[in-house]
Amino acid sequence: MEFIPVCEPFLNGNELDYVNDCIKTGWISSAGKYVKAFEESFASYCGTKYAVGVCNGTVALHLALSALDIKKGDEVIIPNFTMIASAFAVCYTGATPVFVDADSETWNINVKKIEEKISDKTKAIMPVSIFGHPCDMEQIWALAKKYNLKIIEDAAESHGAEYKGQKTGNLADITAFSFFANKNLTTGEGGMVVTNDETLYKKCLYFKNVCFSLEAPRNYIHNDIGFNYRISNIHSAIGLAQVEKANEYRDLRIRNANLYRKYLEGVSGVSFQKTRYDVLNVHWMNGILINPQTYGKTRDQLIVKLKSNNIDTRLFFVGMNEQPALAKYGCNISGNYPVTKILTENGFYLPSGSNLSEKTIQNICDIIRNFQ
Ligand SMILES: Cc1ncc(COP(=O)(O)O)c(C=O)c1O
């Protein structure tokens, strides 16, 4: 069997034409026309008023937190089961991330366990739409209102997802996306902050460009410490072409998820992320959990089997409470996170790129089924 990567970018629209245009015209830095065009088209896709392009999803989160004035001494509640960038972005501000275990069905932050982690230092909640599944936002909105907290959505994995009919980007005060190569929409490396709040938008524009004044002529006097988080015209050119096909790319990922569920139906000991009835899950990655008692083999044995058939996989994230970097930083890593533990010990992703054929997915599933 030919090598099946865990994910490949899918670039079958105007990407090459737009990139050629950047090269031919010499507009390769962040000053070209594609930056604005990408921002406007992505804002329009999300149905938000404003979007600010940046160079990756991690800095998009940091910029969003900075715009909300999150700083040293503050606490931000994040899921324990997430990619490390969610926590690191909080650390960059000097604030402390506080962890909440995952929900056993959606694998998102367990909203029932957030309130017990709120202290007088808590300033914000950062829900993460794990694998493309938005969180139960009504519960989070209620807590934010009760305790006067801000909400930053880490939507790195959930372009175009919906919660109760509302698109990601409109579920929080401010939202951060990643356009890394494996994402449903990609620019290779890239990110975006979106918001409906003009003040937050202007702060993002200001901080992302080393705090050059947004109004005054460029006199090289800087009143605040800013960042260079600019995205290039070339990356934005790819992004614009991707957004033009956003629904097509989203639907290919959803199709993958449906095919995996179809071809693995009835295989005991294999389970998937459960999608709530009121969300549109955009299925960035197809994660599965292996129960070794009922499947008869461990997750790691299955990964070796798939590898011997040239099928690439990835382990799930390891919980934030297990991260030496966060312990050293001063996060409280004590306490039990039983759901994260199950996910980390038994979960992995199957190939999930938008260009997979049905036959390939069927073959992968046959190997999993027959290995039992
Ligand atoms: C949940 C989550 N947050 C943040 C990021 C960071 O995005 P980037 O890799 O573009 O910096 C990722 C990237 O994979 C992610 O999955």
Image: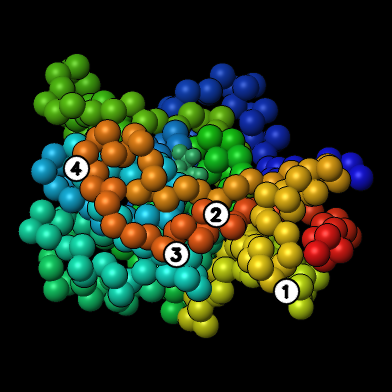
Q: Secondary structure at mark 1?
A: loop
Residue at numbered disc 4 = 95
Q: Amino acid at mark 2?
A: Glu
Q: On the image, numbered disc 1 is attached to which residue?
A: 268
Q: Residue furthest bottom?
A: 277
Instruction: Tell me if I can see residue 170 in this picture.
Output: no
Crowd around label 4: few <14 · some 14–19 · many ≥20 (10 Å): many
Q: x and y percent of residue 39 in the render? A: 45, 46
Q: SS class of the residue under badge 4?
A: loop
Q: Earlier in the sequence, mark 2 or mark 3?
A: 3
The answer to which image quadrant residue 337 occupies is: bottom left
Residue drawn at the location 53% of the way across and 35% of the way down: 189
Callout 3: helix, strand or loop? helix
Residue 250 picture location, percent across and down: 63, 61
Asked whether residue 321 is in view, the answer is yes
Q: Earlier in the sequence, mark 1 or mark 3?
A: 1
- Give the colour scheme of this rendering: rainbow
Image quadrant for the N terminus? Answer: top right
What is the CA distance from the residue labelled 4 to the residue labelled 3? 25 Å
Give the residue type at disc 3: Val
Instruction: Residue under label 3, please give it.
Output: 339
Q: Quadrant of the C terminus?
A: bottom right
Q: Is residue 249 left or right of residue 168?
A: right
Disc 1/disc 4 C-alpha distance (Å): 43 Å
